[in-house]
Amino acid sequence: QLQLQESGPGLVEPSETLSLTCTVSGGSLTYNGYYWGWIRQPPGKGLEWIGSVHYSGSTYFNPSLRSRVTISLDTSESQFSLRLSSVSAADTAVYYCARLATRYRSGRYLPAWFDPWGQGALVTVSS
Amino acid sequence: QSVLTQPASVSGSPGQSITISCTGASSDVGGYNFVSWYQQHPGKAPKLMIYDVNNRPSGVSNRFSGSKSGNTASLTISSLQAEDEADYYCCSYTSSSTIVLFGGGTRLTVL
């Protein structure tokens, strides 16, 4: 059974870079048709997709965060990571890693659903 | 940022059925069958309940069903149980630059 687990610092200072890692067990990062990425949820608020990447290098990013986001895969370690630069208090949230299933349409793999999800990691931005 | 529109809250009594709507546009819900629904209990990660509008993953109760009409998708929960009390989010692919949209979430209360 595929499982995902987030890890990383729970506290980041403003203007610094937030870094999280997601470790995948029970499966491979090289499944065709699946992307790997991140979704966040500010306290008491809804879900916001950050971005997802495929082992081939194909990527999808939320345009509102794209300039600050890097997502990288380490297939040998079955891990992928998130880096979010120049953080502020508005970036305080629970960060989830998740596998993104896609559907092939018109020559592209289009995002379809997220499953499974990690348990989430709370990251607070504060000095 | 664009979101899919869901009612903030719905409620129902045990044994009843409820429906949660998710309204988008022709560029997302109306144009593609890539609508999914997630259940989230307090302090827990979201769980996939419905994918591709009306498909249930293995292990999800058949009391949960999905449908779509025009630009609005719906999640119906029949024979409500206390354990169904949670937040529910819809999600859709969009052909706009946003790519992936989530609804604002609906709090389901089982009376």
Image (spheres, rainbow, N blue to C red):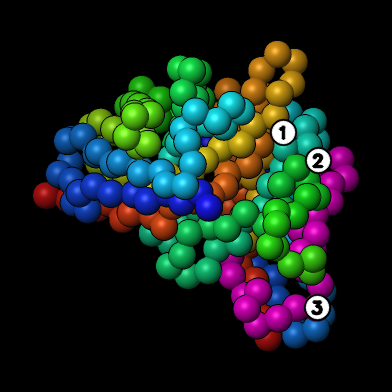
Number of residue marks = 3
User: Please, which chain is the residue tagged with disc 3 on?
Assistant: B
Locate residue B25: give its quadrant.
top right
SS type, badge 1: loop
Residue B14 placement, left or right of A21: right
**For this rendering, which residue is in front, B46 or B61?**
B61
Which sits earlier in the primary sequence, circle 3 or circle 2? 2
Residue placed under numbered mark 2 in the picture: B71
- Same subunit, tags 1 and 2: yes
**For this rendering, which residue is in front, A68 or A29?**
A29
What's the CA distance linking mark 1 and mark 3? 30 Å
Identify which amino acid the numbered label 1 is placed on: Asp
Residue placed under numbered mark 1 in the picture: B28
SS type, badge 2: loop
Q: Which residue is situated farthest in the top direction here?
A: A107
What's the CA distance linking mark 1 and mark 2? 8 Å
What's the CA distance linking mark 3 and mark 2? 27 Å
x then y, percent, for residue A51? 46, 32
Which sits earlier in the primary sequence, circle 1 or circle 2? 1
**For this rendering, which residue is in front, A2 or A14?**
A2
Question: Residue shown at 62%/49% (left/top)?
Answer: B103
> What is the magenta range?
B64-87
Residue placed under numbered mark 3 in the picture: B79
- Residue B99 in sight here: no
